[in-house]
Amino acid sequence: IIIHISRRDNDQPPLYFNFIMTSKAGYQEIAIVDYNDVVQDHSKEHNLGHFMEQAFGASSKDASPLGVIAIRNVPGFVEAKRQFFPMAHKLAHLPKDYLENNLTDPESLYNAGWSHGKEKLGDQPDFAKGSFYFNPLTDMPGSEEDRKKYPVSYPCNLWPEESKVPGFEKAAKHLGKLMKDVTAHLSKHIDAYVNGKVPDYAANTLFAEIDATEKAKGRLLYYFPLDDYKTGASEDSWIGWHNDSGFLTALAGDMYIDDATGEILEKSPDPSAGLYVVGRNDEVIQVNIPSDCMAVQLGECVQIMTGGAVVATPHCVRGAAANGVSRISLPCFIDTPPVFPLTMPPGFTREQVVSSALGSSRVPPLETRWTEDGQTFGDFLGKTFAMYYEWSQSDK
């Protein structure tokens, strides 16, 4: 069930809600804010605090924070998405030897260019999806010293030849940069919301990092059809349960496509396919991002640096139980350099931060990965990746 409500008065920004009903969770609302309010500085006329509370707030009493907020009316977004997404089909069906020999980067642990079967889903190589990683802001991020010291964090871009996928590089950079810029604007409103909850939280703390960073990693995902679609898809058959471990992730929504022909489908033939999150009471909630919206998802690093005023949410992607159907999506991970210290606001304790997390058996506890105040982002990521692998092998 989807209900749209819009409102404008002298003191409030436009209000949109999507109400999604699932068998476990009943009704849950997802906030959608207007781009024109996002790009304005926080003020009485452009106060998005209610939406920040609804999407990310640890203290929200009305409903579980979903950890994601959608943004409508981003200039050029719909057109950029429609231009770029279908190219994923052509890329994923290039000859395997070309993809492996020309577009893979083992030195960065496959964090640039093409990756298929290099990651693991549980304890098995993940062939359910192919990924193309790229930095939409620069082909050579960081300094030469940064790239040598942190090859995983600062990989150089690899692009398919223009003759193989015409317009791919230009379209990827355009959409990724647009999403990064909008996310930076939204970070100001997250800062303003947190400052109202945590007086010692410095103004524009998150915005200063997100606006200045050149560490943006786009991941164009092509989910191949499920081999066992007739038996039904498990809830995490395309991407397993996890928290985003970085700062902010821009999402371009999704597109479903006929894998054999490349024909774009108006909607998923399986309404249960797509993104799911875990709520405050460990209930599973389906999240549908409208096709004309981009979205922003919160990572655990922001939860740490805000003292738990905002929280990251466990999520996964369920495959489509339909013959020959693929899914395309584009998250863009916007993070700080690996040396950035993950520090709580003054006067907070680790217990306050970790206790604000949405407890779930689906992801390893934050306290086992964020081991001390001031731990670097790079070290936190390393511990997180190792812990997720161990978690996937355990009985929990």
Image (cartoon, rainbow, N blue to C red):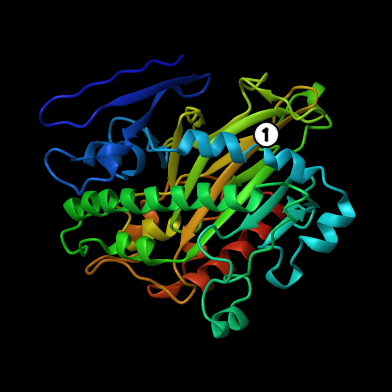
**Residue at 62% in and 23% down:** 272
Report the front residue among 165 and 374: 165
Classify 203 as above or below 177: below
Judge from the rendering whether residue 215 lies leftward or rightward of residue 62; answer left or right: right
Q: Amino acid at mark 1?
A: Arg
Classify 266 as above or below 134: above
Judge from the rendering whether residue 59 lies leftward or rightward of residue 4; answer left or right: left
Secondary structure, mark 1, is strand
How many numbered markers are drawn?
Answer: 1
Near mark 1 (Cα within 10 A), the count class, few <14, some 14-19 or many ≥20, is many
Report the front residue among 294 and 80: 80
Q: Position of residue 288 (x, y in %)?
A: 50, 28
Judge from the rendering whether residue 266 lies leftward or rightward of residue 207; answer left or right: right
Q: Position of residue 220 (x, y in %)?
A: 63, 47
Q: Position of residue 150 (x, y in %)?
A: 59, 77
Q: Position of residue 314 (x, y in %)?
A: 51, 44
**For residue 328, what is the image quadrant?**
top right
Residue occupying the far bottom of the picture: 145
**Residue at 32% in and 25% down:** 16
Residue 244 visible in the snapshot: no
**Residue at 79% in and 32% down:** 226
**For residue 97, what is the image quadrant?**
bottom right
**Residue at 51% in and 75% down:** 142
Residue 17 visible in the snapshot: yes
Report the front residue among 23 and 110: 110
Judge from the rendering whether residue 38 lies leftward or rightward of residue 390; answer left or right: left
> Residue under circle 1?
327
